[in-house]
Image (cartoon, grey):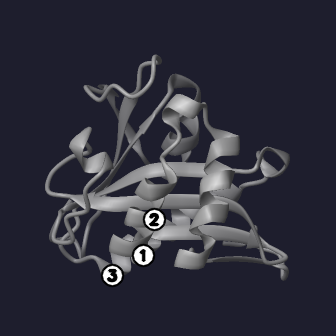
Amino acid sequence: MSNLSIADSIRRVTGHEVHEAWLLEARCFPSDETASKETLEYRQREAPELFWGYFKDSRLIGLICCTQAPDKLTHESLYKHIPEGKTVCVHSVAVDQEHQRQGIATSLLKHLLQHVQENFDQVTKVSLLCHDKLKLLYEKVGFQCRGLSEVVHGPRPWFDMEYSISHGGDRH
């Protein structure tokens, strides 16, 4: 996380900060792709160890929000957290427009991947959906495109992206 300055930090988003996270996501995504405030509250409450914020001078300017699922990211997994799941599903990576293209999304993704690698022994992969224009961002961090997704959320097509987790060489 060499991109962090002294005034920047990555830490868990608290329940008191979910409203701010919801506003950030609403600024970053079209309305048909934005999670409801209730959905974000659920994700923070049920999977706080998978809801991270990038803070600059104590202001939330980026976030990554995830839950776990048994096998893969599906439409149902957008709304349900299964703590024993083998897949971490990234539901949103959002960075305030004025701070985009500064490595914040990459820092959040790398932080999440390291956190999952070190703390989630049962997890074998991290999955997310993205539009075509963001595939390169995720590929640079190590995700592989698995093709068009079956998940429909809004009018534009989504691609399944997957990052394999290995634990001491015994799993992929």
Secondary structure of the residue carrying numbered label 3 = helix
Tell me residue 141's x, y (percent). Answer: 52, 51
CA–CA distance between discs 1 and 2?
Answer: 10 Å
The answer to whether 84 appears left or right of 3 in the picture is left
**Label 1 vs 2, first from the N-terminus:** 2
Which is nearer the eye, 167 or 38?
Answer: 38
In percent of the image, x 43 and y 49: which residue is there? 91
Q: Three-letter amino acid code at disc 1?
A: Pro
Q: Three-letter amino acid code at disc 3?
A: Asn
Cβ atoms at labels 1 and 2 below 8 Å apart: no
Q: Which residue is mark 2?
A: 41
Quarter of the image holding residue 16? bottom right
Give the vertical position of 160 relative to 96 (above or below).
Answer: above
Secondary structure of the residue carrying numbered label 2 = helix
- For residue 119, the mark is 3
**Label 3 vs 1, first from the N-terminus:** 1
Regarding residue 113, the answer to whether it shows in the image is no
Quarter of the image holding residue 157? top left
Which is nearer the eye, 158 or 116?
Answer: 158
Q: Three-letter amino acid code at disc 2?
A: Glu
Local crowd at mark 1 within 10 Å, few (<14), some, or many (≥20)? Answer: some
**Label 3 vs 2, first from the N-terminus:** 2
Q: Which residue is mark 1?
A: 48
CA–CA distance between discs 3 and 2?
Answer: 23 Å
